[in-house]
Image (cartoon, helix red, strand yellow):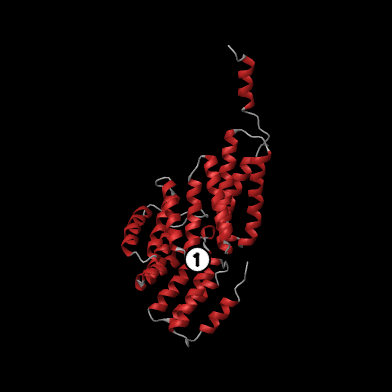
Amino acid sequence: MGTSLEAVRSYTLSSRISELRAGDIEDLELSVAQFSATYSAHPPMELWKKVTRHRDRAASLLTQRRHTLREGRELSHHAGMLSVILAWLAHDLGDRGFVDAYCDDAWEQGLQAGDLEIGAWAEDVRCTDALYSGREVDALAAATRGLAVAPPGSRVALRLRAQLARVYAKLGQAGQFEEVMRRVKRESDRLQPHRAGLFGVDAAVVTSYGASSLVWLGRHEGALESALEAIERYEDMPLPYQAPTRLAIARLDLALAHTSLGDPQAAIGAATAALAEGRIVQSVRIRAEHVHYRLALRYPTVEGLLELQQLLNGLPKE
């Protein structure tokens, strides 16, 4: 026999060698959980700096410390999820380049970890970013790519299916929207009314997506009803579950519905309330500017329009 007993034993021992310290992987896992759970409670730029430090730490552990294959997969998993969080922050800050870069990195880390669900979460971000920047075809491609790898019945699968529904609505494809949304609503019957975290999905999100979709389809009475329901759900959320960005979007959907239904004063009131939510990110800013544009086009002399413009001009920039 050409291989000695000692050599065989050395193979086994070498596969266990690791330079990681106790707690290195657990610290990354905890950071992902904390950042996702408290995402809406922090200004995006403040959170960006914190998450970036942890993503850099993950990269250092992956490339500069010897570790086992199992540890490498765990490190890649947490690194990928940190990149998804950074992609969301890049979206909130309006930096498309970083959105794509971090989504691509999340996919790569997911491949290394053997967990394609990470890529599905990345496509959830990419879909939203494309939708709010007017790239509906890119949004459709992102939702489709994500659904192709999302585990059946998972939270990310439901999120992406709801995304797909609103993409169809933005494209004006009412039939496809209705078909997909029917399935989303069937699946959402089992959802909790409130669920905390960046990677959660609850009944409020589904209702809010429906409101936006009906606005885009021109079904303004239905949009008004859905927006009011979404606002009520978000306002009733206890502190750990609050989602100021989604609440602001629901208020702006309500403003658009009021605009189309001939009530500009109610629209201005809803838009003003949205901009008072405190966490003004790029998607809220884009939606609010669209509300102002629609109001100015249809009701150029309505009282309060100038004040809304001044409020928009005074929004803080990250």
Point 61% across, 23% down: residue: 12
Q: Is residue 227 left or right of residue 44?
A: left
Q: Does 77 sit above or below residue 313? A: above
Residue 192 seen anywhere in this rendered image of the structure: no
- Identified by mark 1, the residue type is Ser
Return the x and y of residue 91 as percentages of the image width and height.
55, 61
Dividing the image into 4 quarters, which one contains the C terminus?
bottom right
Point 43% across, 74% down: residue: 256
Return the x and y of residue 269 as percentages of the image width and height.
48, 78
Point 60% across, 61% down: residue: 44
Residue, far front: 2
Return the x and y of residue 203 as percentages of the image width and height.
41, 58
Question: Of helix, strand and loop, which one carries label 1?
Answer: loop
Point 45% across, 51% down: residue: 156
Dividing the image into 4 quarters, which one contains the N terminus?
top right
Residue 91 seen anywhere in this rendered image of the structure: yes
Return the x and y of residue 270 as percentages of the image width and height.
47, 75
Q: Does 283 sit above or below residue 308? A: above
Q: Along the line of sight, which residue is nearer the eye, 258 or 10?
A: 10
Residue, far bottom: 301
Q: Does 282 sit above or below residue 73? A: below
The residue to which callout 1 is attached is: 133
Q: Along the line of sight, which residue is nearer the eye, 260 or 3?
A: 3
Which picture quadrant has residue 77? top right
Q: Does 158 sit above or below residue 10? A: below
Say few, some or many: other residues with alpha carbon within 10 Å of mark 1 (under 14 / 14 to 19 / 20 or more): some
